[in-house]
Amino acid sequence: MKNLRYILVLCSILVSLSLSAQQQSAMRINEYLVTNTNDFQDDFGQQNAWIELFNTSYGTVDIGGCYLSNDPNNLKKYVIPRGDVMTKIKPRQHVLFWADEQPFRGTFHVNFNLLDSDVIYFVSSDGRTIIDQIKVQKNLPENVSYGRTN
């Protein structure tokens, strides 16, 4: 009887943990800026195009191992590194990626730019499943971002 109680407690803990763990599919490409001359600066003091991902869920989502791409024939163009604490996106929060073609600058600097992009893809860690995509509007004025309304 005592063992049964321990098993029930353990099961309830595991169920609550699995319910709080959210899926990568909760992430959305929320906003982007193609031409940045007077907007956010990266950690090197540079102003570049950026892509914002938003966690639509009420649980933390780890996007490590997912991909960002601007090429439908290469959905694995930029892999978001695993093991970076900053890739664990808190509930209802966002993260910014710099589209500056300088991935050597760190986790949040991708290897493509938005001027050469027609579509941005956010791809699951399996490298095949497109979680979200958004068409890039290149005719936006400088420092005007495109944000989703839904």
Image (cartoon, helix red, strand yellow):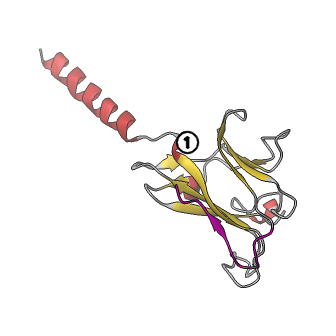
The structure residue drawn at horizontal position 83% and vertical position 58%, both measured from the top left corner, is 112
Q: Quadrant of the N terminus?
A: top left
Above or below: residue 20 compared with residue 100: above
The image shows residue 96, relative to residue 21, as above or below, that is: below
State left or right for residue 54 relative to residue 46. left
* Residue nearest the observer in this picture, 45 or 36: 36
Q: What is the count of numbered marks?
A: 1
In the rendered image, residue 57 lying in the magenta stretch gets the answer no
Residue 146 in picture, x, y percent from top left = 66, 66
**Above-or-below relation of 119 to 36:** above
Q: Residue furthest top?
A: 1
Position of 45 compared to 73: left or right?
left
Q: Residue at x 38, y 34 (%)?
A: 18
Q: Is residue 45 left or right of residue 63?
A: right
Residue in view at x 85 percent, y 64 percent:
115
Say few, some or many: other residues with alpha carbon within 10 Å of mark 1 (under 14 / 14 to 19 / 20 or more): many
Q: Nearest the camera: 118 or 20?
A: 118
Identify which amino acid the numbered label 1 is placed on: Gln
Residue 66 lies in what quarter of the image?
top right
Which residue, given by chain and number where applicable, does mark 1 sit on? 24
Q: Which residues are magenta?
A: 139-150
Q: Position of residue 17 (x, y in %)?
A: 35, 37
Viewer-proximal residue, 9 or 19? 19
The extreme left residue here reads 1
- Secondary structure beneath label 1: helix
